[in-house]
Image (tube, helix red, strand yellow):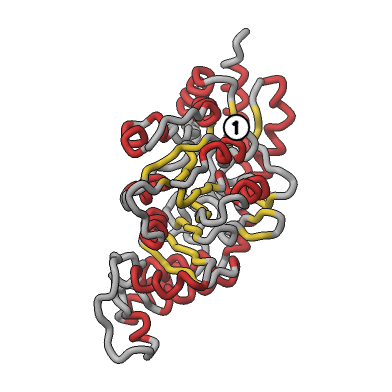
Amino acid sequence: MGEAPEIAFNRPAVEGRELDYVQQAVNGGHLSSGGEFAKQAAAVLSAHTGSAEALMTTSCTAALELSAMLMDLQEGDTVIVPSFTFTSTGLAFARQGAGLVFCDIEPTTLGIDPEHLASLLDEHVRAVVVVHYAGVACAVEEIRAVLADWPDVVLVEDNAHGLFGSWRDEPLGSLGRFATLSFHETKNFVCGEGGALLLNDPDDVDRARVLYDKGTNRHAFMLGQVDKYTWKDTGSSFGLSEMLAAYLLGQLEVRTAIQAKRARVHEHYAAALAPHAEELDFEPMRVPADRSPAHHMYYVLLPHRDRRNDLLELMLKSGVQATFHYQPLHTSDAGRAFSVRDTECPVSQDISDRLLRLPFHNNLSESELDRVVSVFLEAATATLPDR
C-alpha cells in the first residue's frame, strides 16, 4: 500500500450553482461590476446583517480602504488596530494618511483587549478597528463600554473571518459603523478574490456610492435621480466583477449547508482533542457561551514557540498541512514605520508564537478528520519535554 494522500490545509469547493451562474453571467454579456448577480449577493448580506447597504468589492482590503476614505482622515489623525491581524487591517488606514496605534489582544477570543484599548484612546483617535478572530466575536460589550466615553470614534469591524457568526444574537458585521467581509479562497464563502463593505449608518450610503463608483454620481444616474453623471469626489474602482459575484451567489445560496459542514469539522476537533489537552499540555480553541462562531478555523495553543514549531514539522512530515498564523504587526518593519507611538503587545507576541491551525475546509471526511487528530496527538506526545 502507498502512503496516505496529503491532507491540505484549505481546499475551496463548488457547493451549489456557482458554475451555472458564471455561465449565465458570460452568456448575459455583462461581465463588469454592478450586475444582477452582484445585486443579489449584496441583498443576501444586507438581509442577514440589517445593513443599510452592502457594496461588493474586489477584496476585504478594498472594503477597508473604502471605509478609510469615507472618514476623510486628516494629518494627525490616528487609528487603533490590533497587532494580531493581517496587514490589510492597518494598511488601509495608513494609505489614507492615518498614524497607527497597535493594541494588544486578550487571550480568550484573541480580539482587541478592552483594557489596553482604554489606555490608548486620546483626542487624535478617529477609529478603532476590531477583528473577530476565527469567526468568534471579540469582547463586544467591554469595547462598547470603553468607546461610550468617545462617541466620535468610529468602530470598524474587520469581519473577514466572521460572516454568519453572532454575538448575543447580533450578527457579526452589524456592530460597527462600517464592517468588511472577505470572499478570498481561504474563507468560508469564496469567489477567488472578493469582499464587501457593509454600511450600518444610512447617512454614509450616498457618499459611499460616489466613492465606490470612481468618484462619480453614476448610481444616482442609474436610478434616474439625475439626467447625467459627472465627477463629484475622490474614489476608486472598487466593484466586484459579475463573474465573481455569480460564483459567490452560488455559495451564499447554500450558506446553511456550508456552515453545517464547517460546524461539523469544528465539533469533531473539539470533541476529539479536549480529553487530551491536560495530559499533552495544549489549549484547545475556546468559544465563550454567548458567541455563535462562524466556524472559520480551528486552532490550538502550545506552551511555547519551539514546541509549536516542532509539532508543526512532525505533522507536515506525516502529510497533514497544519500551519501557524499572524506575525505581530507592531514588530514588523512597516508597522514600526506607520506607528505613531510604541505600544507593548505581549499577548499578541505570545499567541503568535504558540498558535497552530489545523486543516479546515468544507469537505474533510470523517476519516481525514480522524487522521488529523491522530497525527496531532502523536506529534504532541512526541514533543512532550520528557519524551
Residue 171: x and y, percent? Answer: 63, 60
Drawn side of residue 289 relative to residue 366, left or right: right
Horizontally, residue 376 falls left or right of residue 129, namely: right
User: Does 219 appear above or below 95?
Assistant: below
Q: For the view shown, which residue lies furthest in the left direction?
A: 231
Circle 1 sits on which residue?
300
- Crowd band around label 1 with a 10 angstrom C-alpha radius: few (<14), some (14–19), many (20+): many
Residue nearest the observer in this picture, 79 or 360: 79
**Can residue 368 be seen?**
no
Q: Which image quarter is the C terminus in? A: top right
Q: Identify the residue at horizontal 41%, vertical 35% (top origin).
A: 329
Left or right of 255: which side holds 313? left
Across and down, in percent, residue 71 comes to 41, 59
Q: What kind of residue is marked 1?
A: Val
Residue found at x 42% / y 73%: 38
Report if residue 267 is visible in the image: yes
Q: What kind of element bears circle 1?
A: strand
Q: Residue at x 45, y 36 (%)?
A: 326
Task: Pick whichever, 141 or 121, lies toward us.
Answer: 121
Residue at 73 percent across and 49 percent down: it is: 290
Q: Position of residue 186 (x, y in %)?
A: 45, 49
Residue 224 lies in quadrant: bottom left
* Residue sitting at the far front: 123
Residue 33, placed above or below residue 348 = below
The percent coordinates of residue 167 (x first, y second) are 67, 54
Which residue occupies the foreground of this view, 291 or 210? 210
Image position of 245 with respect to 297: above or below? below
Q: How many marks?
A: 1
